Image (spheres, rainbow, N blue to C red):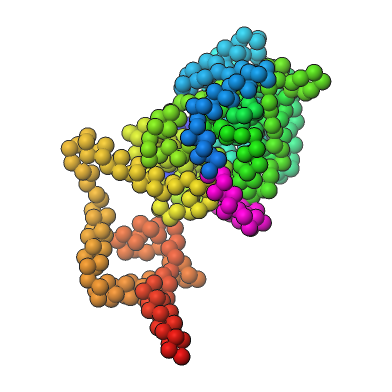
């Protein structure tokens, strides 16, 4: 994505078409999504009790939501008792002003940040830079896209849309690194490490998010694979954590379950390389900050909390598994969603944060295949929520125009044909047999390439269509039932 192109959630369909035509992007997405899926599958296979872990994770997050007001107060009490301070932020503006005020009061000039979706959500970097502070992202992916004046395209892998050749170009252009071209991945990592080391050593403030916050201890947890979050939270004399109010878990002990779920679901690891537990300020003889500030961010979460149909989306632990499993995300990429949250979970929460009128296409950015629910570590029923949001889109359109939205011609035709055949079983059998024969005749290696037929060409213009099975479900059922009856008679 070029820095000048700024897609919005309102233009998802146009964004997706542009992404599908971008050969470099398709190459990057294909390589990354395959790795994420295979690594997760291997890590999950090691745990025969993984479904039980999912049930426990669901229960923990559900309890946290059920008791959220009480747990937030409990968390604040424990943070304060350990020398920290808690600031409450109703929206992005209030959160940004808290950070700016702390930085100004402490004469801060340089700030380092670890990866945080909450700070992306409130555009904290822009607010700090406008206030005159130097801000450096220290996660490698975030560092790359900050240099490129870009936005993240994945919850856990912000620069997943870029190839190593593109990263080389960015380092050569922005860092004046003449040896970046052809450096390879180890060489590019070395360039970033050398550049960022200076920032770590000179920063007066470190800013982070939090993966979890334990109400009964006042602790926050940050998981990572690069070590930069640990440096951001210990080297500077001030540490500020921007934490969404939904990140709470009731007990510190709950983290034993949540960390097993997060690592496997996000990157396919048993546990991330670094797991940072931060509780208050540094004591005598300890490493750590002199000041510890937690900003508890609402910014629309209370509105979701009050929605009987959608509040379960607050269970999300931002692992990104639903993105990696989603056939739409794997082709459209993160920028198509037009905001900081992408994929199936982004299609659910973005319309709630921004307003449905600003993201009416996102609930339709799904095949409703259910893969997102199957991999969600806390069992969020994303397909049901997308259907709920679709109904809200239709209701809003109907209220605005006084009539139900008109379906596209081919969509109306296809549903009409389906209804007509569905009421006539013999004709249905004939049509499905004929259609199956025609499609299989066009297939090669189990896939059907581009078709010129109306409706079907919309499916195959940008993707291969899987060839239909040799038998329909009804045929296979009849065959198996006949075999079972024969065995019973014998």
Residue 15 % position (x, y): 42, 42
Please tell me which residue is depicted at 62% across the width and 13% down the height of the picture. 103
Whether residue 242 is visible, yes or no, is: no
Horizontal placement of 183 versus 132: left or right? right
Horizontal placement of 106 versus 426: left or right? right
Judge by depth and name the residue closer to the eye, 15 or 95. 95
235 is higher (above) or lower (below) than 100: below
Whether residue 190 is visible, yes or no, is: yes
Residue 381 % position (x, y): 44, 47
Please tell me which residue is depicted at 54% across the width and 23% down the height of the picture. 73
Q: Quadrant of residue 354?
A: top left
- Magenta segment, prevailing SS (helix, strand or loop): helix
Q: Quadrant of residue 481?
A: bottom left
Q: Residue furthest bottom?
A: 490
438 is higher (above) or lower (below) than 290: below
| Residue 333 among those drawn in magenta | no
Residue 401 % position (x, y): 19, 36
**Magenta segment:** 29-58
């Amino acid at each position: 994505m070029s820095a000048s192109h700024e897609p919005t959630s309102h233009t998802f369909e146009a964004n997706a078409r542009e992404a599908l035509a971008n050969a470099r992007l398709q190459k990057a997405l294909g390589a990354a999504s395959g790795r994420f899926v295979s690594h997760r599958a291997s890590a999950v296979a090691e745990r025969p009790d993984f479904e039980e872990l999912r049930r426990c994770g669901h229960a923990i997050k559900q309890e946290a939501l059920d008791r959220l007001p009480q747990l937030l107060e409990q968390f604040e009490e424990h943070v304060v008792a350990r020398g920290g301070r808690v600031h409450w932020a109703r929206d992005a503006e209030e959160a940004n002003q808290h950070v700016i005020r702390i930085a100004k009061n402490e004469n801060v000039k340089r700030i380092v940040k670890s990866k945080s979706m909450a700070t992306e959500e409130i555009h904290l970097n822009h607010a700090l830079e406008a206030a005159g502070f130097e801000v450096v992202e220290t996660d490698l992916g975030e560092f790359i896209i900050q240099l490129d004046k870009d936005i993240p395209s994945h919850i856990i892998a912000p620069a997943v849309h870029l190839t190593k050749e593109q990263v080389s170009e960015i380092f050569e252009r922005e860092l004046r690194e003449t040896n970046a071209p052809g450096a390879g991945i180890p060489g590019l990592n070395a360039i970033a490490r050398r550049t960022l080391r200076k920032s770590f050593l000179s920063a007066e403030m470190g800013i982070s998010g939090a993966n979890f916050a334990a109400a009964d201890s006042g602790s926050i947890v940050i998981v990572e694979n690069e070590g930069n979050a640990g440096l951001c939270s210990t080297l500077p004399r001030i540490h500020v954590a921007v934490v969404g109010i939904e990140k709470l878990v009731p007990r510190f002990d709950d983290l034993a379950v949540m960390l097993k779920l997060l690592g496997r679901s996000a990157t396919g690891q048993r546990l991330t390389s670094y797991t940072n537990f931060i509780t208050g300020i540094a004591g005598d003889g300890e490493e750590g900050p002199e000041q510890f500030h937690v900003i508890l961010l609402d910014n629309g979460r209370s509105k979701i909390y009050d929605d009987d149909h959608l509040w379960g989306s607050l269970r999300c632990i931002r692992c990104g598994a639903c993105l990696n499993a989603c056939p739409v995300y794997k082709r459209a990429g993160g920028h198509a969603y037009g905001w900081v949250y992408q994929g199936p979970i982004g299609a659910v929460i973005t319309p709630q944060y921004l307003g449905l009128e600003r993201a009416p296409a996102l609930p339709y950015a799904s095949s409703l295949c259910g893969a997102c629910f199957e991999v969600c570590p806390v069992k969020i029923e994303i397909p049901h929520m997308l259907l709920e949001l679709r109904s809200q889109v239709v209701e809003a359109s109907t209220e605005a125009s006084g009539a139900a939205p008109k379906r596209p011609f081919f969509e109306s035709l296809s549903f009409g044909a389906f209804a007509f055949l569905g009421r006539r079983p013999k004709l249905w059998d004939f049509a499905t047999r004929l259609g199956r024969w025609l499609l299989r005749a066009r297939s090669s290696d189990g896939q059907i390439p581009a078709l010129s037929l109306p409706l079907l060409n919309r499916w195959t213009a940008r993707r291969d269509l899987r060839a239909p099975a040799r038998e329909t479900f009804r045929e296979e059922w009849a065959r198996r039932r006949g075999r079972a009856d024969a065995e019973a008679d014998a």
